[in-house]
Amino acid sequence: MIIIKEFDFDAAHYLPAYNGKCEHLHGHTYKLVVKVEGTPDYEGMVIDFIKLKNLVKQEVLAQLDHACINDIIPVPSAENICVWIWRRLEPLLQSERYHLYEVEVWETRTSGCVYRGEAL
């Protein structure tokens, strides 16, 4: 079973090695989707939505929301943002019943990245 929680955050970034419009500072309203896979407990929940929300707010959104992401991630492509988020959340979303399954980062309504912890 997979639990899904969506978040939005606003941030600016630029792509220093890119040749095009995105090499200049610009902003997005990002959509973040966090998925946790597991088995329901005695209350019928894989993970409490409130627990998941608070964890993501503390570990990810507190850092990225209304920030210049380049100050945190040197090359903040959607791919690198996805990996950064995974690395922050994965150790915290481990239990005998559940684990982090997938992170999605959407820069726009039609452009995003999915990461499942694959080796890079």
Image: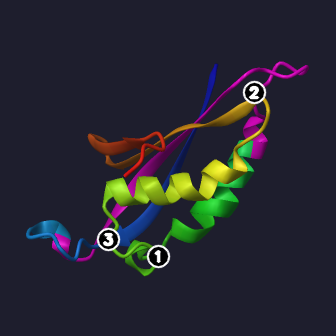
Q: Residue at x 37, y 52 (%)?
A: 120
At label 1, the amino acid type is Ile
Question: In which image quadrant can residue 51 be found?
Answer: top right
x, y percent for residue 89? 62, 52
x, y percent for residue 20? 9, 68
Residue that lies at the very extreme toward the front in this rendered image: 119
Front in this rendered view, residue 105 or 94? 94
Q: Check whether the beta carbons of the residues at disc 1 and disc 3 lie within 8 A of each other.
A: no
Q: Label 2: how many residues lie within 10 Å, few (<14), some (14-19) or many (20+)?
A: some
Q: Label 3: how many residues lie within 10 Å, few (<14), some (14-19) or many (20+)?
A: some
Quick one: SS at disc 1? loop
Q: Residue at x 36, y 76 (%)?
A: 74
Which residue is label 3 attached to? 75
Colour logic? rainbow
Which residue is label 1 attached to? 72
Q: Find the distance from the CA under tag 1 to the CA under tag 2.
A: 31 Å
